[in-house]
Amino acid sequence: MVTAAKIKEAITRLMTGEEGKEVTRRAREIGQKLRAAVEDGGCSKDDLDGFIARVWRP
């Protein structure tokens, strides 16, 4: 069982330590890549548009 103290310790470490800064940096980087992928002309947007066009083809 995880104690409240262990949870508090982990949250504090993520919020104030270097580990937390790295997690935040990485999350921002991934977020930017995801936004680019779903923009017009982005790889995921193009793939989804192509799939929908094929599915709805008469």
Image (spheres, helix red, strand yellow):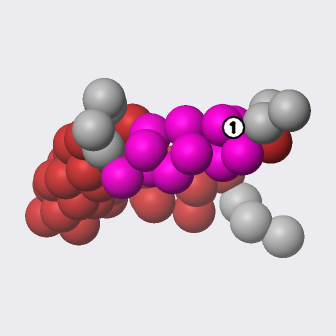
The stretch in magenta equals 43-54
Q: What residue is pinned by disc 1? A: 52
Determine whether, in the image, residue 17 is placed left or right of residue 51.
left
> Helix, strand or loop at disc 1?
helix
Residue 28 image offset from top left, x and y in percent: 22, 45
Q: Quadrant of residue 19?
A: bottom left
**Residue nearer the viewer, 24 or 44:** 44
Q: From this view, report whether residue 18 is shown above or below residue 55.
A: below
**Residue nearer the viewer, 36 or 51:** 51
Quarter occupied by the N terminus: bottom right
- Specify the amino acid type for callout 1: Ile
Quarter occupied by the C terminus: top right
Residue 39 image offset from top left, x and y in percent: 31, 31
Visible residue check, residue 56: yes
**Residue nearer the viewer, 17 or 6:** 17
Visible residue check, residue 12: no
The residue located at (58%, 55%) in the rendering is 7
The residue located at (19%, 52%) in the rendering is 29
Q: Quadrant of residue 53?
A: top right
